[in-house]
Image (tube, grey):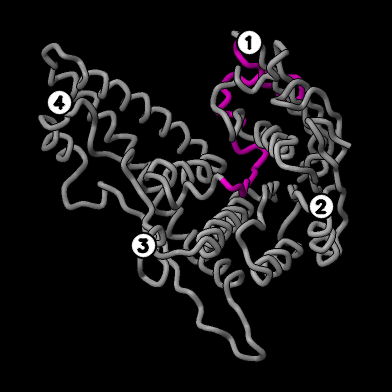
Amino acid sequence: MFLNHITILNYRNIAECDLIFSPKINCFLGNNGMGKTNLLDAIYYLSFCKSHLNSADNQIIKHDADFFMIQGEYVICEKTENVYCGVKRRRKKQFMRNKKDYERLADHIGFVPLVLVSPADSALIAEGSDERRRFMDIVISQYDRKYLDNLMIYNSLLQNRNALLKNSEKIDDTILEILEDKLCAVAEPIFDCRKNFIDAFIPVFRDFYDKIAICTKGEMVEEIETVDLQYISHLQQNTTLKEQFLQTRERDKILGFTTHGIHKDDLKMTLQNFPLKNTGSQGQNKTFVVAMKFAQFVFLKNVSKKTPILLLDDLFDKLDTERVTKIVELISQNDFGQIFITDTNKEHLNKILSKTKIESKIFFVENGKVE
């Protein structure tokens, strides 16, 4: 599977571009702020029906325009598939596959599996649990439609319960109980999917971390850094979620929000058995995240039977030469399909490409114009 052709109009600082890509490696070269990441984001948008950079569609439209449009031509299982997205200010977005509108945008998720590695991934380590839940949700939603449906239902019910809890008037416990029963009904399958995913994901993640982080001196191999991920959820407690809702109901009324549930799930990240956030260097943190994303790639490939598109935005920042070399060796293998890379240094990029010996194209980006 690969993206053969893309047409973009008025997307962030890109006024217009029409590009034909290599099915293997494509590089966007240019100084910072020129639009390289915006190109990756347009490709991301065609997979997820939204931007990775900004959740507000109106703010993605080029400041002097009234709309943006992205159209991609994919080759999937030797068949041409066209995906179109158009957004006008103050209008509902239009998303089509082969000129046919989707009834729900959620039905498109997973059709074009994609993995993005970007500097923003540092939030997986530095920020709160919502970032790590989002990581799980992005992966699982691309191959399990029922999971995505349950997640949307859960979030809607949670919003309703929180709205009731915030109501200053007398709260009807009967309505709360009905909402809690419905929340429990969809929370269980969400928990099961996340647990099964993490159990299968961890060995692949560790393997990638070892391959990137392992260093050699002569014929001696230095000590391998021990890394781990642990899934943490209220549903792992001895009491049921229904019982937890009942136990915390009065406290939730005071606070005005729901304190227990799968919306509080987290991933505990450790290095050498210590919290990664407190002990990891910049290089170790970057390696940890890259290993997670490469494991995500392999996991999606295995379950979807499609080779995801891989976007690498400023991948080699904060990594030493040896780790960069290991990553280049990994992406040069046949396991990976179409790859998009951004970089600011032409010599650095040429050095990377010379090691891969794979078909590639370089696009030069300046002030939103691409050649």
Disc 3 residue crowd, few under 14, some 14–19, many 20+, Cα 10 Å: some
What residue is disc 3 on? Answer: 275
Q: Mark 3 or 1 closer to N-term?
A: 1
**From which residue to which does the magenta span run?**
91-119
**Between residues 57 and 302, which one lies in front from this camera angle?**
57
Tell me the CA gap for discs 3 and 1.
45 Å
Which secondary structure, mark 2? Answer: loop
Q: Residue at x 57, y 58 (%)?
A: 295
What residue is disc 1 on? Answer: 89
Q: Amino acid at mark 1?
A: Arg
**201 inside magenta stretch:** no
Q: Which of the labelled discs sits on residue 284, or is there none? A: none
What residue is disc 2 on? Answer: 24
Q: Amino acid at mark 4?
A: Lys
Can residue 131 be seen here? The reply is yes
What residue is disc 4 on? Answer: 253
Residue lying furthest top: 90
Q: Residue at x 70, y 46 (%)?
A: 309
Tell me the CA gap for discs 2 and 4.
55 Å
Q: Position of residue 288 (x, y in %)?
A: 52, 61
Quarter of the figure with the C terminus: top right
Tell me the CA gap for discs 2 and 1.
35 Å
Which secondary structure, mark 3? Answer: strand
Tell me the CA gap for discs 1 and 4.
39 Å
Q: Amino acid at mark 3?
A: Pro
Q: Position of residue 341 (x, y in %)?
A: 74, 49
Q: Amino acid at mark 2?
A: Lys
Tell which tag, 2 or 1, sits nearer the viewer: 1
Disc 4 residue crowd, few under 14, some 14–19, many 20+, Cα 10 Å: some
Disc 1 residue crowd, few under 14, some 14–19, many 20+, Cα 10 Å: some
Q: Mark 2 or 1 closer to N-term?
A: 2
